[in-house]
Amino acid sequence: MSDKKRVSRRQFLNYTLTGVGGFMAAGMMAPMVRFAIDPVLKSQEGGDMHSVASIDEITNEPQRFEWTIEQVDAWYESEVQKTAWVYKDENGEVVALSPICTHLGCTVDWGSQEEHPNEFFCPCHGGRYTKDGVNVKGTPPTAPLPYYDHKVKDGMLYLGDTISRKGE
Amino acid sequence: MRWTKTDTTQYLPEKEYVDTVLIPLIPFDPASDGHMVKQAYQKELNHVFTNLIEKEYKGRIFLAPDYHYLNGQNERELDRVNQWIATFEKQPFKHIFLFTFDPKWKKHEFDLEGELIWVPGPSSGNIQSTETQSFVKEQAHQISELIQAYW
C-alpha cells in the first residue's frame, strides 16, 4: 500500500521537468500575448487628456497655455503644439477655449485691440468674440470658439478634445 | 494655408480673404562641403519660421512651396523669382513676401517685385534648444507685426 503512494524517481523527475518547463513556457508566452493584444489595451488616440496647467495659475483673465501632443496619421507621427485660452468665470468654473478662429483658422488673441479690450480678436480679418467665446455679430466668424473638454484632477487642469459649438 | 490638398481646397472658395503669400527663399550648394551644414540648418530654421507664421495667420497668409536656388546665383535668379511673384499675383494675391536668411538678396531688393524679409539667422545651433525656440518665437512675432503693417 505504502509503495503505491510513494513517488518513484522517474515520476519525481517528470513532475519537476513539467513544472519547470511550464514556467519557462509561461514566461515566454506572457510578453507575446501582451504584444498581441496591445492595441486593445491602449487608450484611444485623441481621447487622451493632457495636463496643461496648475489650477492655481488660472485667473479671471484669459491666459494662453501651450502643450504638445503626439499626432499620428497614415504617414507621419508628429508632435503638434496645442494652445488654449483658459480662465475662471464668475462662478469659479474653468473655461478653456480653442484659439482657432472659426472663420479661416487664424489664432485669436485676447484683448489685443484697444477699442475692445475684453474680447478675443482675430488679427487676420478682424473677427471678434466675447469673453465666453461667442462670435460678435457683423464680424467674419459665424460660430463661437470651440470649448476644450476639461477636467481638474489633483490640482491640475487636464484638457482633451475640442467640442465645437453651433453658430446662430 | 499651405500647398496641400486640404488647404488649397479651403482656399479656393475663400480667395478674397487670403491675400498674402509668403515665399521661403532657400539657397543651397551641393558641391560645397564647407557650407552644406550651415545651409541645411538655415533651411530647417526657415521652415520653423514660416510654419509658425503660417500657423498663426492661416486664414490670411498662404505659404508658397520653397523656392530653392544655387547659392550665390541671386542675380541670375531675379527673373525666376519675379516670375513666381507675377504668377501668384494672378490669383489675385495682394501682398507677396519673400522670407530668407541669405543676405545676398538685400543688394537686389529693389529689383524684386515682392517685399523682402531678410533676417540675419544663426549659422549653427540646435534647432530643438530653448534658446532657438525663444529666438524664433520672438522674431516670428515681430515679422508678423511687419506683415500686419502692410494689411
Image: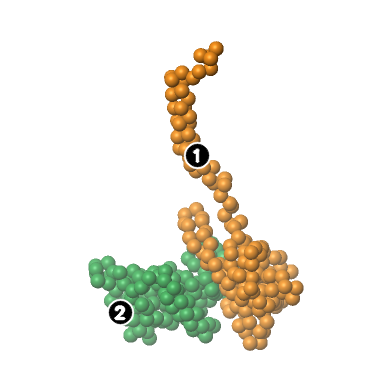
Figure quadrant of the C terminus of chain B: bottom right
Task: Using the image as rendered, state which of residue A96 and residue A4 is in the foreground.
Answer: A4
Colour representing chain B: green
> Coloring scheme of the render?
by chain
Q: Where is residue A69 in the image (x, y as percent from the top left)?
A: 53, 62
Three-letter code, disc 2: Glu
At x 49%, y 62%, the residue is A79
Q: Nearer the viewer, mark 2 or mark 1?
A: 1
Residue B35 image label? none
Both marks 2 and 1 on one chain: no
Res A155 visible: yes
Disc 2/disc 1 C-alpha distance (Å): 67 Å
Task: Kindly identify the residue that appears in the image at 29 percent across and 74 percent down.
Answer: B71
Residue behind mark 1: A30
The residue positioned farthest toward the front in the image shown: A2
Q: Position of residue B16 (x, y in %)?
A: 57, 74
- Vertical order, B68 against B149 (above or below): above
Q: Is mark 2 on a helix, strand or loop?
A: helix
Q: What residue type is labelled 1?
A: Ala
Where is residue B86? Give x, y as percent.
43, 76
> Residue A135: which quarter of the image?
bottom right
- What colour denotes chain A? orange
Residue labelled with disc 2: B75
Q: In this view, does B21 lie above or below B146?
A: above
